[in-house]
Image (spheres, helix red, strand yellow):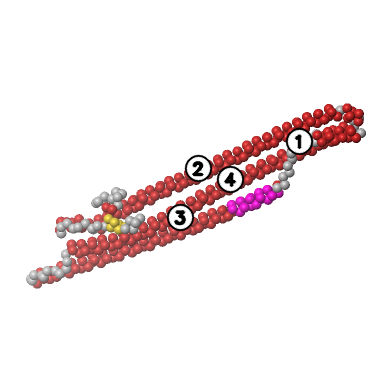
Amino acid sequence: MAAAEAATARKQAATTPESDYAVSTWNGADEDEERRCATQRRTREFSEANRQMAEQQRAERDAREAAERENARVARAEAEQQMREEQMREAATRQQTAEALRQAQEAERERRLTASAAGSRPPPALVGSLFDFAEKRESEEAQRAQQRLREDMAINARLAEAKRARTREEREQERSYAAQVADANFEDFQREVAQSRLRRLQEQKEMQNAAEVAAAAAREKQKQEALVDRSRPDDALLFWAGEDSSRAEETKAEAERRYREEVRRQAERKRAERARDDEEKKAWERALVASDSEAAKAADARERRETQEKIAQLRHTLEDQMAAKKEQRRQEHPQSSQRGLLRGPAPDAISLYRCPVTGELLPASAYDFGIRRGR
């Protein structure tokens, strides 16, 4: 009886499932869950802070643009009001001058008629000639026109400086927005990495649970076999001890072989997962670098296009302004074309124009974008 119980104990020790499977218990699931919850909470807080900051920056930009538009409108209104007042003053001055000239001519005519009726030769008139008066008036009007042009150029320079500052600010905002987008993409990448890590931990946990279930089933089966062995006669156990020992050795070797195969498969699976994660990370980094490069190229192209458009606009503005000033002077002083017939050629007046970019007073020949003499 004692020999039978010893044989049964050796058989159970040889075929126990605990030697077939190496089950490791994971005790840090709660800590992983807490870290995951904390990461999600921080991500939500960062997203909310980024959204609030973007809304605040958008509101500030809108308010600043509205203030700039209002200032530009006020400046244009003031310039237009000053121009209208100057035109009204010039019109009143021309009218007064014409009236004074007419009165002087009438007085001179009456004096000559009176002297002619009295039979005496009239003395030479002390007043200047009509051409001297017209030349003086043209000179004064040219000076006033140059003053108005300088004021207009100063206003254009201020507006151009405000536009350049606004353009620089917009570029800075675009760069900050691109940086925020890159940070958000990096946070998404980190979130995906954390989720993939959690998925792997969940799979490992499921595999451990499956192994535990299989081990429990094997133990139950072993118990059933032990009950069957106990129900056999003792004589049979005495005669079958050698056969049962060899069978137990084979079972143990098979269990060890299965365990080694399972460990090898798990190691290969882990290596494949690590390689896949590394490849995904490299692909994501390459995509981020490509996106940043494309954004930088687009920003440079947009900046060059805006610069070219601004140069073309300034060129057209100066050309139109010069042509309008020349046409206005030609219409206001039609008698200047007869000056050469009566008084001889007069030197051409040099008109200086203030550059909207540098603010310097330069002649028309200094601009190399198509200003032609006599246009």
Marks 4 and 1, the one that precedes in the sequence: 1
Q: Where is residue 96 in the image (x, y as percent from the top left)?
A: 25, 67
Q: Mark 4 points at which residue?
A: 189
The segment highlighted magenta reads: 30-47
| Residue in the image at 45% along x and 55% along y | 169
Q: Which of 83 and 190 is in front in this view?
A: 190
In the rendered view, would you say 13 is above or below 35? Answer: above
Q: Position of residue 365 (x, y in %)?
A: 27, 52
Q: Mark 2 points at which residue?
A: 290
Q: Taking the image as drawn, is residue 370 in sight?
A: yes
Q: Say whether residue 233 is left or right of residue 349.
A: right
Marks 3 and 1, the one that precedes in the sequence: 1
Q: Name the residue under label 1.
A: 20
Q: Position of residue 309 (x, y in %)?
A: 38, 49
Q: Mark 3 points at which residue?
A: 169
Closest to the camera, between mark 3 and mark 2, is 2
Q: Quadrant of the N terminus?
A: top right
In three-dimensional space, the C-alpha distance between marks 1 and 2, rounded to whole angstroms, equals: 51 Å
Query: Which amino acid type is marked by label 1?
Result: Asp
Q: How crowded is mark 2: few (under 14 residues within 10 Å), some or many (20 or more)?
A: few
Say if the magenta span includes residue 39: yes
Magenta stretch secondary structure, dominant: helix
Say if the magenta span includes residue 112: no
In three-dimensional space, the C-alpha distance between marks 4 and 3, rounded to whole angstroms, equals: 30 Å
Marks 4 and 3, the one that precedes in the sequence: 3
| Residue in the image at 41% along x and 55% along y | 164
Closest to the camera, between mark 1 and mark 2, is 1
In three-dimensional space, the C-alpha distance between marks 3 and 1, rounded to whole angstroms, equals: 70 Å
| Residue in the image at 69% along x and 36% along y | 263
Q: Say whether marks 4 and 1 touch (CB < 8 Å).
A: no
Residue 214 sits in quarter: top right
Query: Which amino acid type is marked by label 4?
Result: Phe
